[in-house]
Image (cartoon, helix red, strand yellow):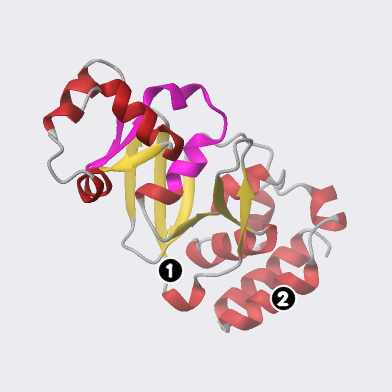
Amino acid sequence: MTYTQFYNQWHSLGCFSTHQVRAIVPDFNRFNFHQWQKAGYIVSLRQGWYAFADCLQMPDYARFFAGKICAPSYISLHTALSFYGIIPEAVVEITSVTTRKTCRYDNAFGQFTYQTVRPRLFWGFVPKTMRDGKQYMMATPEKAVIDLLYLYPQYSSQDDMRELRFDDDWMRDELDKERLMSFAERINSAALTERIRMLRKAYGL
């Protein structure tokens, strides 16, 4: 199979794994991946996963790949908080939540970090659709806040909460406070509930 043939057959996926390719083309020569990567046609996302190099010029593809190279997972924490405008900083690293082990991958598309939660906490995310119709999963604003306070217990005082630099206008006008509290009740953690109380007090909610 030539690269042009491979490109035409697989490009619509954006990225692919060696297992996917071998499942469709059992006699595929895996050495092609090495050659095509060396030629700059494809880039490695992690061991056994590749993306087409022209995806580097396409917006949002890094977020799409985040859910592919470690599944199941959804984007949350600082990346989601930045996406919704809750924190002022532009976040380069893509932070996700997964039921698999905590891990990190660095590749041409950026840095990908995954934090582990138990399966019973793996919820509170919605699909985001890209221009070409592809979708990736991202936490709702309230779940992103919950995930942050649950996974980073060092934020425990009013001063700690203010250091997060959450946008005051967003917190006051756009945060769904009832949903935030219902999410906390669903998790049923006294420590998390106390941290949310500190958050609300710090921002006058």
Mark 2 neighbour class, 10 Å CA radius: few under 14, some 14 to 19, many 20 or more: some
Q: Which residue is mark 1?
A: 117
Q: Quadrant of residue 1?
A: top left
For residue 181, the mark is 2
- Tell me which numbered mark, 2 or 1, is placed earlier along the sequence: 1
Residue 33 position within the rendered picture, expressed as x and y whole percent measured from the top left = 20, 30
Q: Quadrant of the C terminus?
A: bottom right
Q: Secondary structure at mark 2?
A: helix
Identity, as a three-letter code, of the amino acid under mark 1: Val
Percent coordinates x, y for residue 132 in the rendering? 59, 36
Q: Amino acid at mark 2?
A: Met
State the residue at coordinates (12%, 30%). 31
Numbered disc 1: secondary structure: loop
Would you say residue 42 is visible in this rendering?
A: no
Does 32 lie within the magenta span?
no
Q: Which residues are drawn in magenta?
A: 42-66
Q: Relative to residue 183, is residue 72 depicted above or below?
A: above
